[in-house]
Amino acid sequence: MASTSITTVGGVVVVTQVIPKDESSIPLEGTPTAGQAPPPVARAPPPDPVKMDEMTAAFMRGHPMPLGVVQIFIGVMIFLFSLTILLWWTLFIHLPFGLAFIFIISGSLAVAAGRRTSVSLVWASLVSHLVSVVVAMAGVIYDCILIGTQAPTTIICRHEDLDQFTNPESVWIRCVDQMWTLTTTLYGLLGFVLVLLVLQVCISVTVCVFSVRAANLRHTYKPVQSTSDERPLLASP
């Protein structure tokens, strides 16, 4: 009984046929004739392009996802700074910075709206970022007041608390010298928080602008569609 094997090596089709001597050659179906190239390998068609609606396109131009991640980072850092009240009771003046959790919420909404844009998420992002702008600007003003007023060491080392000593003036000077590291650290942290708050204002305003542009196009919002004109496999001809 004759047997045939077909092997492709380096783009060349090698046909091996074993035939008993009392049998003739058996024609091979689908085997390319001499001088004829093998049929090309069929390639899968490219994926269908995705059509983005106008509202989503307008919102995504503002890069909401990376900006939202930055806002979350800012909110976490400022909120951690507000926890310095746990170190010393006189640092209660840092408690208002705990409102930075609003930045975490607005950043999360921006990321969510960037991943799956919808009318409700765009509006939620707009409202949350308007609140963030107000809170961040109030934080900038409050931070500048803290930097421009008395240092924390002058609150800790008060003259009236040192009247019990025989030489309160020298005790006060010694107290201020010992608190110099604390003062430098707190002023450095206040300056860092000020930079973060200014950055938060810029990011919130940017997201608000693109959210408003996207919200104005809400009437043209449609689910994401495919631009392919091909019929389904089971569709009738």
Image: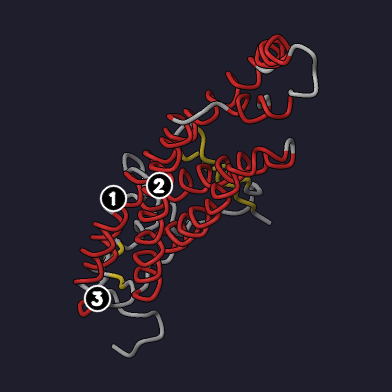
User: Circle 2 sits on which residue?
Assistant: 67
In-front residue for pair 129/66: 129
* Residue 229 visible: yes
Residue 169 horizontal side relative to residue 9, left or right: right
Q: Nearer the viewer, residue 212 or 86?
A: 86
Disc 2 residue type?
A: Leu
- Residue position for label 3: 218
Label located before the other in sequence (1 or 2): 2
Which residue has dot 1 on it?
206
Q: Secondary structure at mark 3?
A: helix
Q: Which residue is found at the position 35% from the left and 51% from the top?
A: 204
Where is residue 194? Give x, y as percent: 43, 35
Height in image: 41 above or below 53? above
Mark 3: amino acid: Arg
Q: x, y percentage for residue 183? A: 60, 21
Residue shown at 28%/60% (left/top)?
59
